[in-house]
Amino acid sequence: MHGTAMQAAAVKGHSATLEILVKAKADPNLTGGPYGTALQAAAALGHQHIVEILLQAKADLNVIGGRFGTALHAAVANGHQSITEILLQAKADPNIIWEPSYGTALQAAAVKGHSATLETLLQAKADPNLIGGLYGTALQAAAARGHQDIIEILLQANADPNILVGAYYGPLEAARRLGHHAIVELLMKTPGIRIPAYLQKRRKITNE
């Protein structure tokens, strides 16, 4: 069910049990179970003390697998800001792509609307233009979910609004289809954005 005994302890938040397993030379990087690794389990469920024990036991920050992809993806997707910061300080890679889920940690933050976490990832050199996951880019994810504040942060970080991939083939189309009119207007005013002809025509009619 939990993959390994160490992952079971991490899921339950049993720090004393985890420390016994560490002393018994349990491998923190074995994979299996719904969270892939014990570190991802602890990160997903917000068990900061467990995360710290596992890092001291040389858990690999960038093992890929499980439900979320990496421990960083898991922490970000579940809104655990302090754990996100701990993982980044320990040199977790913010640019790993995990296709079955959010693609990147930045896209996970955009989907969930976690602006503080998004800014933390950008400060750690997360690339806003990496492509992967359901929405293709973090910018399209924010547009689809209606998170205007996230879009503004991403545009300031040089997110490219002209990357046409993902479920809606770009952030502008995502916002248009899902009825986020303020976001459509914001994106159409973005310098350098390529506006489709049908939107240009509609905008001209509206202005007249």
Image (cartoon, rainbow, N blue to C red):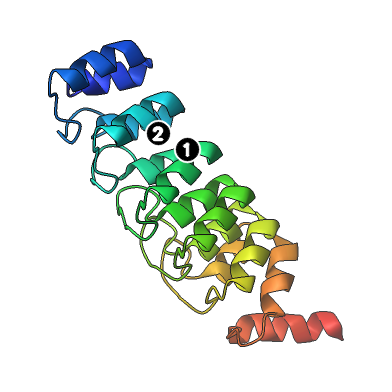
- Counting every numbered tag in the picture gives 2
Helix, strand or loop status at disc 2: helix
In the rendered image, residue 82, in percent from the top left (x then y), is placed at 53, 38
86 is higher (above) or lower (below) than 163: above
98 is higher (above) or lower (below) than 173: above
- Which residue is tagged 1? 83
| Mark positioned earlier in the residue sequence (1 or 2) | 2
In the rendered structure, which amino acid carries the disc numbered 1?
Ile
Quadrant placement of the C terminus: bottom right
Residue drawn at 12 percent across, 24 percent down: 25
Residue drawn at 38 percent across, 31 percent down: 52
- Which residue is tagged 2? 43
Quadrant placement of the N terminus: top left
Q: Is residue 185 left or right of residue 38?
A: right
Quick check: marks 1 and 2 in contact, CB under 8 Å?
yes
Residue closer to the observer: 84 or 169: 84
In the rendered image, residue 174, in percent from the top left (x then y), is placed at 56, 63
In the rendered image, residue 114, in percent from the top left (x then y), is placed at 60, 47
Q: In this view, does 145 lie to the left or right of 186?
A: left
Classify mark 1: residues with Cα within 10 Å, few (<14), some (14-19) or many (20+): many
Residue closer to the observer: 194 or 77: 77
Classify mark 2: residues with Cα within 10 Å, few (<14), some (14-19) or many (20+): many
Q: Is residue 47 visible?
A: no
Residue drawn at 52 percent across, 62 percent down: 122
Q: Residue 172 got which mark?
A: none
Helix, strand or loop status at disc 1: helix
